[in-house]
Amino acid sequence: MGPFKSSVFILVLHFLEGALSNSLIQLNNNGYEGIVIAIDPDVPEDETLIQEIKDMVTQASPYLFEATGKRFYFKNVAILIPEKWKTKPEYMRPKLETYKNADVLVAEPNPPGNDDPYTEQMGNCGEKGERIHFTPDFITGKKLPQYGPQGRVFVHEWAHLRWGVFNEYNKDQKFYLSNGRNKAIRCSADITGKNVIKKCQGGSCVTKSCKVDRVTGLFEKGCEFLPDREQTEKASIMFSPSVNSVVEFCTEKNHNKEAPNLQNQRCNLRSTWEVISGSEDFKKTTPMTTPPPKPTFSLLQIGQRIVCLVLDKSGSMKSGDRLKRMNQAGKLFLLQTVEQGSWVGMVMFDSAAQVQSELVQINGGAKRDALIRKLPTAASGGTSICSGLRSAFTVIRKKYPTDGAEIVLLTDGEDTSISTCFTEVKQSRAIIHTVALGPDAAKELEELSKMTGGLQTYASDQAQNNGLIDAFGALSSGNGAVSQRSIQLESTGVTLQASQWMNGTVIVDSTVGNDTLFLITWTIQPPQILLWDPSGKKQGGFVVDTDTKMAYLPIPGTAKVGIWNYSLQASSQTLTLTVTTRASSATLPPVTVTSKMNKDKGKFPSPMVVYAKVHQGALPILGASVTALIESAKGKTVTLELLDNGAGADATKDDGIYSRYFTAYDTNGRYSVKVRALGGVNAARRRVMPQQNGAMYIPGWIENGEVKWNPPRPEMNKNDLQGKQVCFSRTSSGGSFVASNVPKAPIPDLFPPCQITDLKAKLQGDNRINLTWTAPGDDYDYGRAYKYIIGISTSILDLRDKFNESVQVNTTNLIPKEANSEEVFVFKPESIPFENGTDLFIAVQAVDKVNLMSEISNIARVSLFIPPQTPPETPSPSLPCPEINVNSTIPGIHILKIMWKWLGELQLSVALG
């Protein structure tokens, strides 16, 4: 189903779940604080890795300081150490630091041998990235010749992460034509080196100069630009910090604007320094006059999970079965979501707080059942959120410090005094996850999760949307091994009329199946429940709880792989079905879905984007069907298809991150987000993808005029490149966000088409130019644009800065297609002399029906290359052979005799060959 369009407006959202989390980084007096570098739980114990991380950051800090004109340095860093590593006295318990909000992850390469450093970037130019990825071999210096010093590479990745700049090289295209000449893609253009190719045959390799392809004019495939080991040019760090002289970012003066790289494509030809100097970090700092101190480090080891439920039982919880729905969600959390070994306590509150349970360790079903019996059964009184929080702090402190402990706070009521405990909350260093139930929950509630790095969720009173269970289901540990985290396979609901059936299927794939639970809820009376496993065997034994109005069935062992079928029958009531599970193996990563909204608050009419990351370990899942279900405070649900096509809101094609602009809002207030992903219908595939944003792999160097090749990159397995079919189903809570400034209907059309970001151009015969791009919509990436404007110029800067004055191509017959369709347009430049060696630059602008215009697209280029004509071969005239006396003794005749004999032998050998 496509995106819903009614009263349209755009917001920018914020994230809630999974690896896509909020960073704790703060800039304080020029120094970056709160950086979290996490060692993945699957990395084998190696204490030297901790020291190598320290060394990397210590080396990076002065390099960053000088590269930014003495503005920034690394002040303090927390290193998260896996729980299974040996404990040491100097290892402290984390506070707000978790794997979910880590800025850097050190993990084993996937696939093996792929040690590329890279940074996840979902957003546009100038927007912060998600996370830096390093491997242990990179950190320990085993890849030094290929990528350069670790500290320098860290600064390269930091620029991706913090300032949203992009690479100034191009992995897929190494050279481009400029005025008919081949140039290496680099920045600055003053980086020196040689263009060479390595050709291997039979186990031996030779290095040769690159030949020009007579059709394209570009160097032959496989040609590489190898930098000189010794340089004098200082820029640029986003090209290659491994070049010893490079200590600066490219500026407007030395930026290579013509190079077809991501920085130019995504940042409108601006240099990296222009983007950095426009950042908020830059605006609130001035250069330091003294050298910065060295970074300090705190070593934090993950420990047992500590959670306290703080549940509202005020009088308003009687409304709409809220108390029972809270207990259903709480029961799922206690039965399934919270991990074995965790410590759990419970507090309930109205106008005062009451401790229901001190901290108990979950070590079996008896402890879980005991906690479930403590869930509140009656509602009355007022709402005092701070009373509940203070009581939770007391419960936790009886056994542990509150540092890093988690509080799950659910409330449906207004509380004007919530801000009175903000200081206590900050001082506690506890993480608070908030669940807002219904439209009247305290407006400042989300401030608690925002200041502590917790999740913020919202559930309406529409029981069929299953929002409350989704919210609690999202609260798996941020620090445990992935194999221990609860995964939601299905979450759905429906309101049935007389004797109707709710039928459906759930896919259990090979990556999951342990600890599987089917959970059904109802609003009036128990339904008839039928469930069959993939072999067709009917499943019985549901545990029915008529008080809480729910039934559940734990599947023993590992659930069978395949399609499970269910049928539920009831009369005139609402039913929901939830299926949760865990990974089938500690060594096989499960398919996971996490979601992110790019802000937690939006003010009409600023744009908003929803993201969903669908991966198996580090590998992206392609071809999945991914939708976002967004419910407003009015209870209206919008279904939005998310795409991984590298257009519109989607930054990179085929990276397993599905994205979409969202414009269908109908009111101010809270909105909840749920993401659903299905794989298998269109053969969703798992394959290795080259990372788009990371340090360049240097194939070799020129040292003292000689070529020194680095070891070749590991070859990818053909099966990995082609992908492997993955059939699966997943649902995931995307949290909540708050909309404001939304006008009353009818909402005016203030939304232009989105920018075209994937424009490509190539030459065809007869000097015709073939353009391709993904169609934008009438409102960002929804609907259909009204028309296109195509401008051309021989000056790339004139086209960027004076697009309206550029030569416009006749587009009378170009009718825009529906958003996200492929557009193809072929034209012949008539108004500009197009001769051999001419560089032509092209851009497109979309216009909607009310004449709102998109930003100018990325600029594509074509270079006219006319191959030199090869003169026809003219056969040499046949000359009569002179008669030679082979017995002659005349000077010179002896040489002729030898030559004549050799030529005869040569002709004979050729004939025989």
Image (spheres, rainbow, N blue to C red):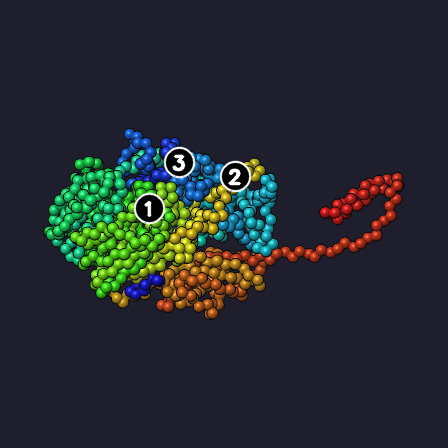
Q: Position of residue 830 (x, y in %)?
A: 54, 66
Q: Nearer the viewer, residue 910 or 65?
A: 910
Sequence-earlier tag: 2 or 1: 1
Q: Residues within 10 Å of mark 1 (few under 14, many from 20)?
A: some
Q: Position of residue 538 (x, y in %)?
A: 30, 54
Please say whether residue 389 is visible from this viewpoint: no
Q: Is residue 140 left or right of residue 475?
A: right
The residue sitting at 50% across, 42% down in the picture is 713
Residue 575 position (above or below residue 787):
above
**Which amino acid, by three-letter code, is at mark 3?**
Met
Question: In the displayed structure, would residue 854 be above or below residue 304?
Answer: below
Q: Secondary structure at mark 3?
A: helix
Question: Looking at the picture, does residue 710 appear above or below residue 784?
Answer: above
Residue furthest out toward the front = 537
Q: Position of residue 885 (x, y in %)?
A: 88, 44
Residue 732, disc: none
Where's residue 21, x and y in %? 31, 47
- Which dot, 2 or 3, sits closer to the camera? 2
Quadrant where the image shows the N terminus: bottom left
Name which residue type carries label 1.
Thr
Q: What amino acid type should be assigned to the residue bearing mark 2?
A: Asn
Q: Earlier in the sequence, mark 2 or mark 3?
A: 3
The label on residue 710 is 2
In contact (CB < 8 Å): disc 2 and disc 1: no
Identify the residue position indicated by label 1 in the image. Answer: 558
Question: As drawn, is 902 to the left or to the right of 394?
Answer: right
* Residue 56, numbered circle: 3
At numbered mark 2, what does the secondary structure look like: helix, strand or loop? loop
Q: CA distance from mark 3 to mark 1?
A: 43 Å
Q: Nearer the viewer, mark 3 or mark 1?
A: 1
